[in-house]
Amino acid sequence: MKFLRSLFLLALVIVVAGGALLAYGTFGDRSRPLARTRVVIPTGTSFDGVLAILRQDGVVAHTLPLHLLARARDEETEVRAGEYEFAPHESESEVLHALVTQGEAVAQWVTIPEGFTSEQIATRLQAAGIGDAATFTHAFASDSTVIDGARTKNLEGFLFPDTYLVPVGAPPGEIEQQFETAFSSALPRDAAQRARALHLSVPQVVTVASLVEREAKVDRDRPLIAGVIYHRLQLGMPLEIDATIEYALPHHKTELSRSDLAIDSPYNTYLHAGLPPTPIANPGRASLEAAFHPASTKALYYVYCGGGRHAFADTLAEHQANVARCLR
């Protein structure tokens, strides 16, 4: 009986000592980091992956206390991706608090979807805590860039859709440079040569890409839609693309009215032949590729036919039959 009592007391001492060590490691140990340390947590990183990064970068000496604390607080899935800066000698409790509240975040991961306008990008940046949407909107509308020797009217179309690690509070020019660098990398290598073959400038082909981005639902339709656009341009036909009118309207509309089709705007491709004056969205890689390498087609019309696909037609009569079939 005395042996069992001794064994119990020993176990109790071990548990208490272990608990004290764990508490110290979580709240009292301030041996790490040794200096101010920046850590990048990529999007999609598991909590175990986060712990590994923190230990590798010297923010924590051991991962077990932080792991147990996060489990006790039910915060294992609350850690947010981003770039964090940790002061020297923070407790592991303080480290975890920063990761789940973004209190120490110095940069945020921001995803810009294909087809977003510059205004939508500005709103997305504000939602991520990067800065003020109105400031970004003004900058995107007033700034420009030079593409293949041609200066753009603004930055619409040249803010490449991708996932970025964006510094919190960075000025618009710094963020624009990130977008523009990614855009330059996404352009086809033969972009200048292809633009000349299409009798357009590179920025004009990017405008075509923005139309393709807004019109196509699936990648395999993109080169055909681009081909229709070029065919109509060659014949001097108005493009008659609803998305260009939507871009000119002050507010997004799911359906256009007859009065919308008569709006007095250079973006009204029902009234004005040729391309709109600027891109109407920021195209992704697939739409850029389609615009610079369109399909050769005799088609002049297309209509959305469900299931992500469009029906194409060479003549107005064929197009009207497709409309009757697809929109019934």
Image (cartoon, helix red, strand yellow):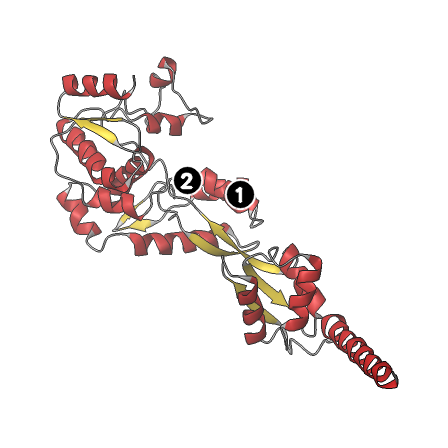
Position of 119 relative to 102 (above/below): above
Say what amino acid the circle numbered 1 marks: Thr
Q: Earlier in the sequence, mark 2 or mark 1?
A: 2
Q: What element carries label 1?
A: helix
Q: Is disc 1 surrounded by few (<14), some (14 to 19) or many (20+) residues within 10 Å?
A: few
Say what amino acid the circle numbered 2 marks: Phe
Residue 218 placed where, x, y %?
Answer: 29, 39
As drawn, the residue found furthest toward the top would be 258
Q: In this view, does 15 lie to the left or right of 49?
A: right
Position of 203 relative to 35 (above/below): above
Q: Observer-nearest residue: 29 or 205?
A: 29
As drawn, the residue found furthest toward the right would be 2
- Residue 85, by quadrant, is bottom right
- Residue 282, by quadrant, is top left
Closest to the camera, between mark 2 and mark 1, is 2
- Residue 272, by quadrant, is top left
The residue under label 2 is 116
Residue 57 placed where, x, y %?
Answer: 56, 74
At x 53%, y 65%, the residue is: 40
Residue 179 placed where, x, y %?
Answer: 40, 52
Looking at the figure, which quarter contains the N terminus?
bottom right
Specify whether residue 8 is in view: yes
Looking at the figure, which quarter contains the C terminus?
top left
At x 51%, y 43%, the residue is: 124
The mark found on residue 135 in the picture is 1
At x 27%, y 52%, the residue is: 187
Specify whether residue 203 is in view: no
Residue 69 placed where, x, y %?
Answer: 70, 65
Position of 109 relative to 226 (above/below): below
Q: In this view, does 320 lie to the left or right of 60?
A: left
As drawn, the residue found furthest toward the front would be 1
Q: Is mark 2 on a helix, strand or loop?
A: loop
